[in-house]
Image (cartoon, helix red, strand yellow):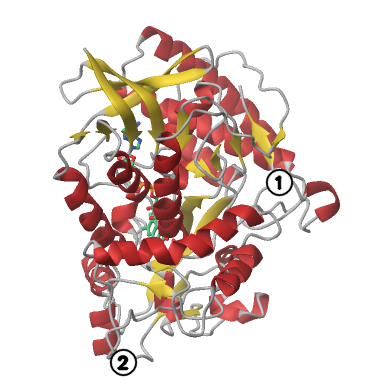
Amino acid sequence: MSIVADFLVIGSGIAGLRAAIALADAGRVIVLTKADPRESNTGYAQGGIAAAIGSDDSPDLHARDTLAAGDGLCLPEAVDVLVREGPRYVRELMEWGATFDADQSGHPALGREAAHTVRRVLHVRDATGRSIGQVLWQMVSTHPRVQVYGDALALSLLTRDGRCGGATFLDREGRVDDVSATRTLIATGGAGQVYRETTNPPIATGDGIAMAFEAGARVTDLEFIQFHPTALNVAGAPRFLLSEALRGEGAWLVNQAGERFVQRYEPAGDLASRDLVARAIVREVNRTGAPVFLTLAHLDADYVRSRFPTITQACRRAGFDLATDRIPVSPAAHYVMGGIETDMCGRTSIDNLFAAGEAACTGVHGANRLASNSLLEGLVFGARAADAMKGSTVQASLTGEAGEPFLEADAAATVPSASDIRDVMWRDAGLVRSRLGLAPLVDQLSGWRAAVSKARAAAPSDRDLRRVASLVTVGLLIARAALRREESRGGHFREDFPQRDDIHWQRRIADRL
Ligand code: FAD
Ligand code: SIN
């Protein structure tokens, strides 16, 4: 079956839904989403959405903090768009029905997160993403010009003569269908599942990044993965996120002996940027041979439980009282700074193909994302991509430097499982990297990728093979980029090159087939 639409949106997180709302003014929109339409990373976002709306804040200050977190690699033009347009789109969300927590005078109560110099994070308790998602979903699901296909797994992009004309997908009955569209937006989110330890839900397998790369699009900055310092660390339990907003409200990281330790490694202490706090935890665990904990026992227990009800419940399920117990934590893969390279309007290197949200790389985050800038990016750049999709079709002019040629390897003897890939990625392309681990990792992933491609050629609509192909492709792109970048910056730390090296590496590098 072939479905015809003006616009195809793949993904129903904040970026896809915001884009679909804008596109519906101009034509028929199809949204494909691989699970329940409300399932996305967006729905799990806890801390909130950053926007310079406070009386002590300004877009310039927000830009300064974003650039500092990005460690010299943000694209200033993209940051400028984010911080200047952000407040307008957040106010629009409020007009559409988003009700952020308010202070006594009715203004949004702004939270604090790491590396923000002022309180700037709008939130709905600790379930901000779910609340924003509901507002957007309500508009999309009732719009007569938007049709949403749930349980519809996009398998590959349809391209001809360097132009994208839609995608093939597997429907919930297991049939392969096509959507033919004049413009396609990839809004498939991140790829935390590439790693054994992650805060991301199972949908986050990097499908859009892999599909775009397979179709010949440029991808950039994939060595930069953000590891969140504080995921719940209980054997057998999911790595549930313990929001940075907890530390923003005064929680402490302590070691087994109950001592605060982050300042021993980082002068900014518990609210230093995520990469620094995550590595401080690794060093403390290595020094003491014991786990580390988050404690809120010195704060008002009623306040803690009412401000963080979702986290309170998750801790209870794991046998802890968030307000009074020490909660064991460890770092986990959280966010992909890189992705499909786009210009400021979501255009990619392929005509008629656009990308927005975590799957895209606008350059806004550089080497490390400032907390709560991701929901904002999805909102602002989702809307901007939609505006460009309604306009004329020009290819993006992109700035990332071309990487080395991508050579296909000989196929390995067996197709790997998802956990094979996730284990080696965690071991060799995680928080601390070196040539010793990365070089063999690239070889192993190249062989695995070739084996998966061969298996997919025989079974192109196999759901599991699509998942494994995404994990192995994105894993390989991360590992290749991490091996190439011989310095340490932001989320990328090489123990064999521990310093930032602006002379050789203050540049972004792209990869393409
Ligand atoms: P997503 O919200 O991930 O949506 C992707 C969509 O694509 C999903 O609907 C998925 O099903 C669909 N999809 C994927 N592959 C396919 C396919 N092959 N075919 C069809 N559909 C597909 N950021 C903040 O700014 N503030 C926070 O407080 C915050 N907290 C977070 C807490 C957690 C636990 C996590 C995991 C992330 C958090 N983030 C936060 C990051 C933020 O939530 C995400 O970066 C952001 O929501 C991404 O939005 P998106 O629209 O790009 O993608
Ligand atoms: C958190 O609440 O700690 C996550 C916020 C983010 O990823 O921006």
Residue 222 or residue 200, whichever sits in front: 222
Which circle's residue, 2 or 1, is located before the other in the chain?
A: 2
343 sits to left or right of 332: right
Q: Secondary structure at mark 1?
A: loop
Rendered position, 478 above or below 82: above
Question: Does residue 293 appear in the picture of this structure?
Answer: yes
Q: Which label lies toward us, 2 or 1?
A: 2
Residue 76, image x, y percentages: 65, 57
Residue 186, image x, y percentages: 41, 35
Q: Secondary structure at mark 2?
A: loop
**Residue type at the position of mark 2:** Asp
Distance from the alpha carbon under mark 2 to that under mark 1: 43 Å
Residue 71 or residue 99, whichever sits in front: 99
Quadrant of the image for the N terminus? Answer: top left
222 sits to left or right of 105: right
**Residue type at the position of mark 1:** Ser
Residue highlighted by disc 2: 300
Q: Which mark is residue 387?
A: none
Mark 1 C-beta closer than 8 Å to ligand 2: no
Q: Residue at x 52, y 57 (%)?
A: 227
Quadrant of the rendered image containing residue 417: top left
Q: Which mark is residue 434?
A: 1
Quadrant of the rendered image containing residue 305: bottom left
Q: Residues within 10 Å of mark 1 (few under 14, many from 20)?
A: some
Quadrant of the image for the C terminus? Answer: top right
Residue 397 or residue 456, whichever sits in front: 397
Residue 507, image x, y percentages: 74, 46
Residue 444 or residue 50, whichever sits in front: 50
Q: Residue at x 48, y 52 (%)?
A: 335
318 sits to left or right of 241: left
